[in-house]
Structures are given as C-alpha cells and as structure tokens.
Amino acid sequence: MLEPVPLPKSRLEALTDGIFAVTMTLLVLDLKFPAHALDERNQFVSALVAMVDRFDDYAISFVALCVFWLAHLRLLRRMRETDSTFVWLNLGFLLLTTLVPMLTALVGDNPSHPRAAVLYGANLVAILAVEALMWRHMCRGLHNETVSDPEALWRFVRRRFALAIGIVLGGILAALVEIRLGITSGLASYSYLLLLAAGVARPLFGSLRRPQDGGPTRL
C-alpha cells in the first residue's frame, strides 16, 4: 500500500492567512454612517451613538478572529507536515470563520433579539470544536518531531478548549433564557466577552509542563 504523501504546510498557511485577512476586513463594512449624518448636529450625534452600539459587536468579533488565528498559528508552528484529513478539517474551520461577518451583522441589526446571539454563539462553538479536532489530529494522527509528548499536549489543549466551549455555551443558554422570559435586553451577546477576558484566551495557548523535567513548553 502506498504511503500517504505529506501535503505542503506553506500552502495551507497562505490560504488560511488570506481568508482570515479578508474575513477580518469584511467586519468593518457593517460600520456605516447613514446618509446626510453630517448635515445637522442632532443627526450626527444620533448616528455616532448608533455607530458605538455596533462597534462593540465589531470589536468582539475582530478579537475573536484574532484569537482563532493565533491559535491556528501556534498549531501550525508545532507541525512539520499535514495530511488530507488535517486539510479538510482546516477547510471546515475556514468555512465557519467566514460566517462571522454575516452573523456579526445579524447581531448588530437585531440587538434585542436573543436568537441572533444564539446563532452567533453556535458558530463560535463550531469553530472551537473544529479547531480542537485539528489539535487532536496533530497530536494523535501526525508524526511531528517538535512535539515531545503528544498525549500530554492534547490533554492540556483539550481542557482549555472545553473551558472555552463551556463559556460560549453559557452565553447561548443565557440567550435561550431571554427568549423564554421574553427579555430583549441583548445582554447574552456580551457573555461571549468572557471568552476573551479573565485570562481564558491566554491560558488556552499557555504553557505545558514537561512531565520529564517540569520545564515549561510554549504552545
């Protein structure tokens, strides 16, 4: 039986960087001043307030994409080669990330509708889940000399992804409760900030201690 031919990692990096660049740029297209917003002072103030309300959604999504891209960067840094399984997982990961601008616009257009926050959160969960599968495949399915203890690395990363997914699921649950109670405050969207605050994003790709010498290994 023929051995699978390793696929060039550089092509995958280039594709991922390009799609992330376009996706992060598309986010800003949702920030628009209405026509004639500068004609009168009252109109300008109202437009500016509306812009601030949408800017928080833009900022959350932009930082979330930054976190996902940095995680992917650290993942590929640990790899020497890829295979078709990893490539397809990566393509699925990119597919989900390209939905972020559309779902961000949906939340911005419907700030008082929790269902928009549910869809946004569900996509974040899917992105995290696929990225976790990529880490798992790297640790268990590929031979990479840069990883001294693949199982220990996977256990560490799995815990961090589980925590991140749990936080996003909490935001989805909050949105479902709002739907049930008929609340339209839109506060559920802000719960996703927990993914980027309180040290969650940082330890998601923090240090791993080597069992053999107790020293730190950077992901």
Image: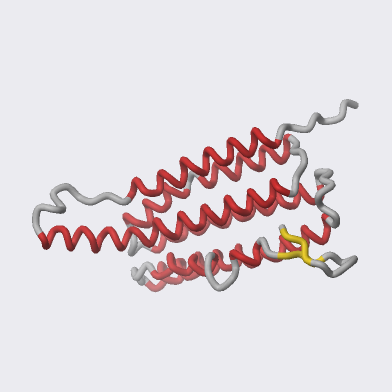
Q: Where is residue 179 in the image (x, y as percent from the top left)?
A: 41, 67
Q: Position of residue 214 (x, y in %)?
A: 84, 70
Which residue is farthest top? Answer: 2
Q: Give the colour scheme shown.
A: secondary structure
Closer to us: 51 or 175: 51
Closer to us: 160 or 174: 160
Question: Number of marks in the image?
Answer: 0
Closer to us: 191 or 78: 78
**Vertical side of 199 occupied by 21: above or below:** above
Q: Where is residue 187 in the image (x, y as percent from the top left)?
A: 40, 70
**Vertical side of 101 occupied by 153: above or below:** below
Left or right placement of residue 20 versus residue 213 in this view = left
Closer to us: 176 or 89: 89
Which quadrant would the C terminus be assigned to in this image? bottom right
Left or right placement of residue 181 versus residue 131 in this view = left
Is residue 50 something one can see in this rendering?
yes
Is residue 130 something one can see in this rendering?
no
Indicate the quadrant where residue 170 lies: bottom right
**Vertical side of 142 occupied by 216: above or below:** below
Q: Where is residue 90 in the image (x, y as percent from the top left)?
A: 64, 42
**Residue at image location 56% in from the left, 41% down from the top:** 17
**Residue at image location 70% in from the left, 37% down from the top:** 9
**Residue at image location 71% in from the left, 41% down from the top:** 86
Which quadrant would the N terminus be assigned to in this image? top right
